[in-house]
């Protein structure tokens, strides 16, 4: 009886630690966990751990990650090859079976992620209903849904094959989940979204102004090229981005002067969001490196790095994509800083302990 009581107490602590709070409802697993509740909670937690990017010592999670990555690459490769008419005709049954297989796996993955999302560390997903709705609206969940939705829509609607190809190619974005570098870039874009939105909005104004201006200067001289402002908008995009295809060029003196001004403005306009991203990316990498150093300092407070601390440090290193050599250098620096200076570096005498005032 005592063992059972201890087990239930530990399980309550386990579940309440996962949720971050205790539940007052009598029929809730957090108040009186039964065997089914405990089993279901552990399975959900384990599935969440498997589907998330693998931890250093989790072999099953690593195998699942590698399998999903291989399946994404195989699926996208099949989509590309399917656009070749001869291959699409000759190997149509193979492409169809592969499509059915990949969609089935991705559907199971999506449903399992949706079911296990309350076990996430993100508090937005903890609620069993609202949490899952919030997860469904998250960027990666939307990408997962788009990767499988066209297949089911095509069963009920006659969709254009090119649209299906476009949506199926979005499966490439599923790889972002397994790339810390892409995750960092997404975090940077999210942080600077207000500034980037303002820059993109101003860029749109410049494009409209450039299209209107070149239409005013060149329409009479080249009515077949600059037929209207929407047609001139193509010239504006090509000029502002400094691509310059040459299919539409100004011939009037005022048109050339205006085009030169637009080109110079385009260089500065494109540089603004690029500069914002580069600056913020540098700051983000610096902050993450400092967080790694802080983690090392905290682990070395007692002078010993335990096995659990080592696993946390290794997981943090992989998330930051630090090389083993760089991580080892930071560890040596942290160890040197944590060691107390016992002898004077000048005379060699032992230093006396500093007395507290």
Image: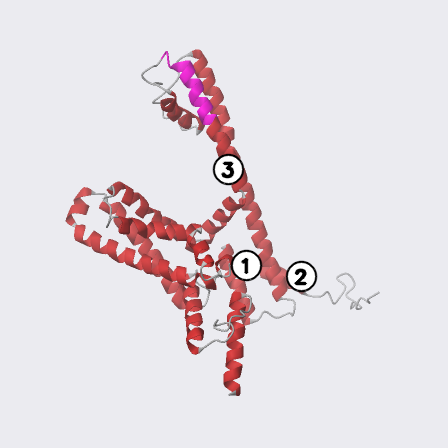
Using residue 70 as the reference point, say whether residue 295 is left or right of it: right
Q: Circle 3 is placed at which residue position?
A: 197
Q: Quadrant of the C terminus?
A: bottom right
Query: Residue 307: image x %, image y %?
Result: 54, 71
Question: Does residue 352 sit above or below 267 in this rendering?
Answer: below
| Magenta region | 206-221
Q: Magenta-highlighted stretch: main secondary structure?
A: helix
Residue situated furthest front in the rendering: 26
Q: Is there a contact, CB below 8 Å, between mark 2 and mark 1? A: no
Query: Residue 81: image x %, image y %?
Result: 24, 46
Q: Is residue 324 visible?
A: no
Front label number (3 vs 1): 3
Q: CA distance from mark 2 to mark 1?
A: 15 Å
The number of numbered badges drawn on the structure is 3
Q: Secondary structure at mark 1?
A: helix
The answer to which of marks 2 and 1 sits earlier in the sequence is 1
Q: Is residue 189 visible?
A: yes
Question: Does residue 221 sit above or below 74 in this rendering?
Answer: above
Q: CA distance from mark 3 to mark 1?
A: 36 Å
Residue situated furthest right in the rendering: 357
Front label number (2 vs 3): 3
Q: Residue at x 54, y 42 (%)?
A: 192
Q: Residue at x 46, y 57 (%)?
A: 130
**Does the magenta portion include 220?**
yes
Q: Circle 1 is placed at which residue position?
A: 327
Query: Residue 110: image x %, image y %?
Result: 36, 58
Residue situated furthest bottom in the rendering: 1
Q: Residues within 10 Å of mark 1 (few under 14, many from 20)?
A: many
Identify the mark at residue 337; answer none if there is no mark.
2
């Amino acid at each position: 009886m005592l063992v059972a009581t201890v087990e239930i107490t530990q399980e309550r602590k386990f579940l309440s630690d996962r949720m971050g709070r205790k539940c007052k409802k009598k029929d809730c697993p957090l108040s009186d966990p039964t065997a089914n509740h405990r089993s279901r909670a552990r399975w959900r937690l384990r599935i969440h751990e498997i589907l998330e990017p693998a931890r250093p010592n989790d072999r099953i999670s690593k195998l699942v990650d590698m399998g999903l990555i291989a399946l994404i690459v195989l699926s996208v490769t099949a989509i590309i090859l399917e656009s070749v008419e001869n291959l699409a005709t000759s190997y149509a049954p193979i492409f169809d079976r592969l499509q059915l297989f990949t969609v089935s796996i991705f559907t199971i993955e999506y449903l399992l992620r949706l079911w296990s999302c309350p076990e996430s560390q993100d508090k937005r997903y903890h609620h069993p209903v609202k949490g899952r709705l919030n997860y469904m609206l998250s960027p990666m969940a939307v990408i997962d849904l788009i990767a499988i939705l066209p297949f089911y829509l095509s069963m009920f609607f006659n969709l254009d094959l090119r649209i299906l190809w476009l949506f199926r190619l979005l499966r490439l974005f599923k790889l972002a989940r397994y790339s810390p570098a892409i995750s960092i870039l997404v975090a940077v874009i999210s942080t600077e979204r207000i500034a980037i939105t303002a820059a993109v909005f101003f860029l749109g104004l410049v494009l409209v102004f450039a299209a209107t201006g070149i239409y005013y200067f060149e329409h009479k001289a080249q009515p077949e090229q600059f037929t209207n402002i929407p047609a001139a908008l193509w010239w504006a995009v090509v000029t502002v981005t400094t691509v310059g295809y040459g299919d539409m060029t100004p011939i009037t003196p005022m048109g050339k002067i205006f085009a030169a001004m637009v080109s110079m403005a385009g260089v500065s306009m494109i540089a603004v969001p690029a500069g914002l991203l580069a600056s913020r990316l540098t700051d983000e990498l610096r902050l993450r490196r400092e967080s790694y150093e802080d983690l090392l300092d905290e682990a070395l407070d007692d002078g010993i790095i335990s096995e659990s601390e080592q696993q946390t440090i290794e997981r943090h290193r992989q998330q930051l994509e630090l090389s083993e050599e760089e991580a080892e250098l930071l560890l040596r620096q942290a160890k040197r800083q944590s060691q107390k200076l016992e002898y004077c570096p000048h005379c060699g005498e032992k230093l006396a302990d500093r007395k507290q005032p």
